[in-house]
Image: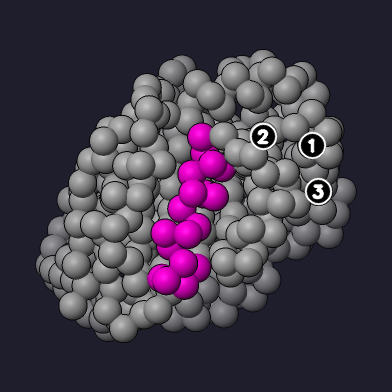
Amino acid sequence: MNRITVRTLDCGMPLVVEEMAGVRSAALSWLVPAGVATEPEARLGLCPMWAELVMRGAGGLSSREHADALDRLGVGRSAEPGMQHLRIAATMLGTRVLEALPLIVDMVRRPRMDEESIGPVRDLALQAIESLKDDPHARAGLAARSRHFPGPFNRSTLGTVQGLNAITRADLVEGWEARARPGGSILGLAGAVDPEAAARALNGLLKGWSGSWPEAAPRGTPVRGYAHEPDESNQVQIVALMDGPREPEETSILEKVVVSVLSGGMSGRLFSEVREKRGLCYSVSAGYSGGKQFGAVEGYVGTTPERAQQSLDVLMAELARINSPAGRVDQSELSRALIGMKSRLVFSGESTSARAASLASDLHRLGRARSLDEMAAQVDSVTLERLNGYLAGRTLGRVTVQTLGPAALKMPA
């Protein structure tokens, strides 16, 4: 039986551990309060550069030495920028956790950020922005989010060309030192882990670590509405964003079911109505993201210029129809949605890395860590009456629509 324990380390950082029966691996997810929402306006790009630099040497070890030390222990690792946090992730055998922790702690407390690494890291970040030219779906999504959310939560995790070019080594070193603090950080461990031994090791490794960095707060009023970006290609990207419940709200589970009905594979309404019946697009989907401050539902269609207007019309009609009496969910749709959600839960429960990430994320968004059993019970609690009751009061609100292609489209009434 899996067991979750949450404790506060001597430095003040929360540690959440799930001991998972029947696995030999272990995973770590460390949220450091250095996300893109914390960046100064004139230095947008610090977070993606930090995500690369913490992997390039730490403590007394050079980039090659640090990488070799982790490789000898069989530790897979990554770092990725997020909105509030930069997340450091690692996977390893459970027997290697205590040996790996000093090397991972150094990545947070003592990254080298050597001068010779700054230029190559900046070039990689600039190349990532340049690569958006070949990824119109990503460009449309970034443009939609930039208008839908208030600042600084409307930022790209890639930074900007101007911001990246302005960043100095001093900005990187001083900015990281200010943000990489126990207050605002969360560490999750899952798998073949001894929580007592891990806590003892971390208390020793983090001795003297103190301070905090506050969460970013929303500011300004989002623009929303319709916008078009010209792009001379034979494809059109359509992204629609609308508000949804935040993850801590009770209705977030209902919104997840709604999205699963809309976009639950080939049986989903969007696939059936936009692609299968009418042949309007090559790709259609919907997704829900629930954060601590915001929740959102995103609809997407990738199509051709000739079919773009009708694709937008049908997409928006289906997103609105599910809220109407004529579009209420039936029992077969609900059953398919719940089975799909339970299946995905089971698969995630077999992954130590997925569980470590979920534990740390839950602690940030909800203030507590959920077990798989609790999440499964939430899914089971959704009845047809409850779901359609929620839909009866659900509205699209002020929608943001972004198109990218040869010509602008007309927003449906």
* Lower sequence index among marks 1 and 3: 1
Name the outermost residue toward the right. 232
Quadrant hosting residue 117:
top right
Query: What separation in Å lies between label 1 and label 3 (alpha carbons)?
Result: 21 Å
- Between discs 3 and 2, the one toward the N terminus: 2
Q: Which residues are magenta?
A: 92-109
Badge 2 density bin: few <14, some 14–19, many ≥20, Cα 10 Å: many
- Inter-mark Cα distance, 3 to 2: 28 Å
Q: Position of residue 233 (x, y in %)?
A: 85, 54
User: Image point 48% across, 30% down: which residue?
Assistant: 180
* Colour scheme of the picture: one colour
Q: Position of residue 298 (x, y in %)?
A: 48, 52
Q: CA distance from mark 2 to mark 1?
A: 9 Å
| Residue at the image position 38 percent from the left and 28 percent from the top | 208
Image coordinates for residue 57, horizontal then vertical, percent? 68, 43
Label 1: state its secondary structure.
Answer: helix
Q: Main secondary structure of the magenta part?
A: helix
Picture layout, residue 200 above or below residue 389: above
Kindly identify which residue carries mark 2: 112
Question: Disc 2 or disc 1, which is closer to the eye?
Answer: 2
- The residue indicated by pointer 3 is 131
In the figure, residue 334 lies in which quadrant? bottom left
Q: Which residue is mark 1?
A: 117
Label 1 crowd (10 A; few <14 / some 14-19 / many >=20): some
Closer to viewer: mark 3 or mark 2: 2
Q: Amino acid at mark 1?
A: Ser
The amino acid on which the numbered mark 3 sits, given as a three-letter code, is: Ser
Disc with the residue nearer the chain's start (2 vs 1): 2
